[in-house]
Image (cartoon, rainbow, N blue to C red):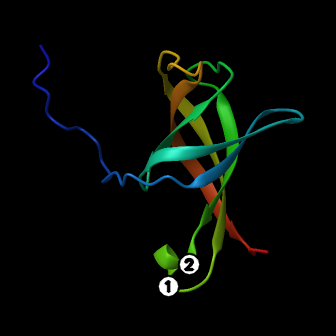
């Protein structure tokens, strides 16, 4: 029986941030997040991935969120949920952040 109680460890923020997702050799997808937390993110993409798949992505945090400078973050994670395609045919993907590193922004 589900109670509808929230079980997330990290607070989610509804942020639309540009993200570049690498889902395989030579496959890079430009999309945007729907929400972000310290433990993961949610975004949509035009191709199907499977739960458990590993992905790499790069986020650019804008100056208004970081105190004046752009911050680029490279992340590695795993797909934990794949939603049905939306009206545009894009699937929703929830992924955990397994590791990350900050890189110099251009």
Residue at 59% in and 24% down: 90
Q: Residue lying at the far bottom in this picture: please name it.
A: 68
- Viewer-closest of 80 and 45: 45
Q: Residue lying at the far right in this picture: please name it.
A: 26
- Viewer-closest of 32 and 26: 32
**9 vs 86: above or below:** below
**106 vs 37: above or below:** below
| Residue 100, x across and y down, in percent | 62, 58
Residue at 63% in and 73% down: 71
Quarter of the rendering occupied by the N terminus: top left
Q: Which mark is residue 90?
A: none
Instruction: Please state if 35 lies on the left or on the right of 60 as rendered.
Output: left
Q: CA separation, marks 2 and 1?
A: 6 Å
Label 1 residue SS: loop
Q: How many marks?
A: 2
Label 2 residue SS: helix
Residues at marks 2 and 1 touching, judged by CB atoms closer than 8 Å: yes
| Residue 22, x across and y down, in percent | 76, 39
Tell me if mark 2 has few (under 14), some (14-19) or many (20+) residues whose alpha carbon lies within 10 angstroms of its own.
few
Q: Quadrant of residue 77?
A: top right
Residue at 53% in and 30% down: 93
Residue tagged by mark 2? 63
Residue at 19% in and 38% down: 6
Quarter of the rendering occupied by the C terminus: bottom right
Instruction: Please state if 40 lies on the left or on the right of 8 as rendered.
Output: right
| Residue 98, x across and y down, in percent | 56, 47
Tell me if mark 1 has few (under 14), some (14-19) or many (20+) residues whose alpha carbon lies within 10 angstroms of its own.
few
Q: Quadrant of residue 69?
A: bottom right
Instruction: Please state if 59 lies on the left or on the right of 38 as rendered.
Output: right
**18 vs 28: above or below:** below
Residue tagged by mark 1? 67
């Amino acid at each position: 029986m589900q109670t509808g109680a929230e079980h997330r460890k990290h607070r989610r923020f509804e942020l639309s941030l540009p993200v570049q997702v690498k889902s395989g050799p030579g496959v890079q997808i430009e999309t945007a997040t729907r929400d972000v937390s310290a433990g993961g993110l949610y975004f949509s993409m035009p191709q199907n991935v499977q739960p458990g798949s590993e992905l790499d992505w790069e986020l650019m945090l804008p100056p208004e969120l970081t105190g004046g400078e752009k911050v680029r973050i490279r992340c590695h994670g795993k797909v934990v949920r794949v939603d049905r395609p939306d009206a545009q045919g894009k699937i929703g993907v929830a992924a955990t952040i397994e590791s990350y590193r900050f890189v110099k922004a251009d």
